Image: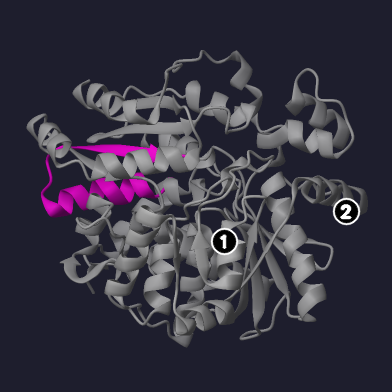
Amino acid sequence: MHYISTRDNTLKRTAAQAIAQGLADDGGLFLPSQLPNFTPEHWQTFAQMTYAQRAANIMALFLPEFSCEELEILCAKAYSNFNDPAVAKVVTVGDDCLLELWHGPTHAFKDMALQALPHLLTASLRKTGETRTACILVATSGDTGIAAMNGFRDVDGTKAMVFYPQDGVSAVQQLQMTTQEGENLGVCAVKGNFDDAQSGIKTIFADKELQAQLSAQNCFFSSANSINWGRVLPQIVYYISAYVDMVEQDKLKIGETFNICVPTGNFGNILAAYYAKQLGAPIGKLLCASNQNDVLTDFINSGTYDKRRDFYTTVSPSMDILISSNLERALYALSNNDSKAVKNWMAQLKTNGHYTVNDDVKAKLQEQFYAAACDEATTKATIADIWARYQYLLDPHTAVGYNVAQGYKAEAGDNAPMLIVSTASPFKFAGAVLSALGEGTDGNHEQALAALTGWQVPESIAKLADKKIRFTECVAVNEMRGVVERFAAM
């Protein structure tokens, strides 16, 4: 197996090279040239394994340069500091199953991949003979930056620089980033939104002069965003694991079709579910849930991707995105691996702000995906309703997913079991959750939410207020390059 670019499928890299490099030379995204085949024996053995063992065995099928033993050690380290032994926990709320992906050290689903990526990256550097320091650039709408910093903290051979949108993350998310310890880390706010930060980083990645400058300083660029295949691969694992667990919990019969609803902005989380389906998990419809920034909803329903629209700052900030980078990988698969078409669509998006796929791709897209959006008032009403009925706390992103899942069932009359992805602890967005429950938001939001509900504030969040703020810089998008130059030279 080799890895190719979504924009040029003649460009070939090994798995280790793809992970180490992050972004392809032509600006495309790496993905495997073919997907491995899962056998019935795979599904049977997964049931007897821990989550870390499942992860090692699944990732081994995509990483031919890595031994299974090597990956077992890697995954055991990656998932050793989660606060639930299940790691990715399936729970029942009402008539549906929720996949809780927030039991890691930063309490958001990004931990599922970003606790593994530093190990994958450093191993890939060794395998490719790379001796330079990897300067990892991250644009974040909130959780990615936090999880990346936690994962890469003081990891030899790496530096990680995170850019986040000023006024575009929750108070807890900002504190988690600006107080993060680690000598090899940097954080900077950007005057703009997530798309501005992400576009700024892509421009820096394409800057040949800066690349040469860094190489002279014994550094090179890599990425911890979901443009890196090393981010997507660990995410495939939890969908396969969830299916196995649902069977074990008698929520499903072996082979029974179930639907998955994913609240998503950058399309990486739902892309991983799509890949799990291609590997043989009996997934039916993939529900793409958007907040008020509904560019993905409009695209799936119309076939036209148009970023020329108002940007909204919402109570679900990790989904406040108008340029969904990982959609490119899905388009490659749905266009029958037509890298020229993908390259053309991405060029149109960059130049004109929009593109329209052909009728064949549109039909395939709508066959696989359902899309709907949830506004702010409905998001808050969903949080209040689920708490009142089930005494279960949804964070705002999960509330978006929950609402869209119920809307789909009513609209489609589809009674297949539903798995809703729960992406973050409600305590990361305690102010918004308190407001949704009709409570005031003065004082310590996290403690107030705990007192109201009896749920416990995660220890690391409870201690944030006492930590020293280390990073205060805020720059315009055109100043990001200078920040990276200074950081790489440190």
Residue 322 placed where, x, y %? 52, 50
Q: CA distance from mark 1 to mark 2?
A: 30 Å
| Count of picture labels | 2
Residue 367 sits above or below residue 409 on the image: below
Look at mark 2 in the image and give the residue it sits on: 390
Tell me, for residue 296, which label it has, or none: 1
The magenta-colored residue range is: 115-140
Residue at 33 percent across and 29 percent down: it is 478
Residue 385 sits above or below residue 486 on the image: below
Q: Which of 350/405 is in front? A: 350
Q: Magenta span has 129?
A: yes
Q: Which of 350/215 is in front? A: 350
Tell me, for residue 5, which label it has, or none: none
Circle 1: residue type = Leu
Q: Is residue 379 left or right of residue 200?
A: right
Q: Residues within 10 Å of mark 2 (few under 14, many from 20)?
A: few
Residue 86 placed where, x, y %? 60, 56
| Residue that extends furthest to the front in the rendered view of this protein | 352
- SS state under label 2: helix
